[in-house]
Amino acid sequence: MNLKKNLIARSCKGMEEKMNLRTKTTKIFAGVLLVLAGLPDAHASSQLLPGISTGLPLGLPLPPGIYSVTQGNYGWRGSDPTVGVGVGIPAWLIWSTPWTVAGGRFLLDTVTAVANVDVKGYHSYTGVGNTYVDAQLKWNLGGGFSGGVQSGVFLPVRNDLTALGVTRNFYSFMQIAALTYERFGWEADVTGIYGTGKHGSELGENAAPQWANYDLTALKHIGKWEFGAVAFGSRDLSSPVSGYERQGQFAAGGLIGYQLPRGTLQLKVTRDLAETNYTGRETRVWFNLIMPLWLQK
């Protein structure tokens, strides 16, 4: 089962129903925001959008304070119909506490995303994603290296996106391991992510695959500018319902960033180089806005 079949089947349940839906839901979904957790791509696969952490040094033990990451992205893949997906998070809030555990900085964070799935010529669906609550430990490893682990839970949500498998109406869990290198103006970030699934009868309502993602970043900082390359991959690890076709992808692209008076703005463009059981290769445009809201003195 892939998204295109699922969406077309749902959109075409009777011509009268389809016409009524179009009449009642004629809306303009202006560029939806983006960002770092809680919403997958337009399919039933990874619960965290693949590539979402590219450009972000997730292995870094942040100085004590409160930080916000605002992200926005829009991607499109396939044809007849083309499926466009916008994902956004106004504020992924991170509290880097003054406490340490086993020598590592203890952090807490939460995020809720929003998304719009637009099947060109058929229908658009929109809704909030599963809220994510997370705890982290980050260590300074020396020699420019830092690393950390984090674990959290996605809270259930049910809306128009649930029947598409984009949101899940049950609890699920995610674990992340990240390594960051920053030295001599260079930065490299490697992030591995695993998410739980559930066997059931209906995607989104009571079933979703286990999944794994990896996000890669290499940057060069030159003054207030940064330039680099990003890449990411994703893969389903299980088939949660009968007939489910496991999905996977690998994408790469470029990044340019600029240090603002308060925070950093990053722009990225990526393109799938390979995909399995999607409706075509995806092109996606992203932005990250990383800002400290308050720093402990």
Image (tube, helix red, strand yellow):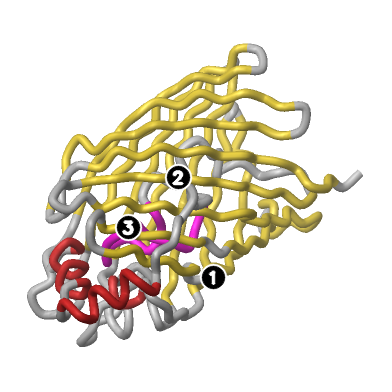
Q: Is residue 253 above or below residue 92?
A: above
Which residue lies under the disc numbered 2? 73
CA distance for labels 3 and 2: 14 Å
Please name the amino acid that badge 1 sits on.
Answer: Thr
Q: Earlier in the sequence, mark 3 or mark 2?
A: 2
Which residue lies under the disc numbered 1? 131
Which residue lies under the disc numbered 3? 118
Give the quarter of the figure containing the C terminus: top right
Taking the image as drawn, is residue 35 in sight?
no
Q: Is residue 276 above or below residue 127?
A: above
Extent of the magenta region: 36-49
Please name the amino acid that badge 3 sits on.
Answer: Asp
**Residue drawn at 62 percent across, 46 percent down:** 139
Please name the amino acid that badge 2 sits on.
Answer: Asn
Residue 251 on image: x %, y %: 28, 38
Quarter-wise, where is residue 13 in the image? bottom left
**Residue drawn at 53 percent across, 51 percent down:** 33
Q: How many C-alpha atoms fall within 10 Å of the one at disc 3: few (<14), some, or many (≥20)?
A: many
Give the quarter of the figure containing the N terminus: bottom left
Q: Residue 103 versus residue 207: which sits nearer the camera? A: 207
Evaluate if marks 2 and 1 touch, with contact meaning CB atoms under 8 Å apart. Answer: no
CA distance for labels 2 and 1: 18 Å
In the image: residue 176, left or right of residue 293: left
Q: Earlier in the sequence, mark 1 or mark 3?
A: 3
Find out whether residue 286 is within the magenta segment: no
Q: How many marks?
A: 3
Q: Nearer the viewer, mark 1 or mark 3?
A: 3
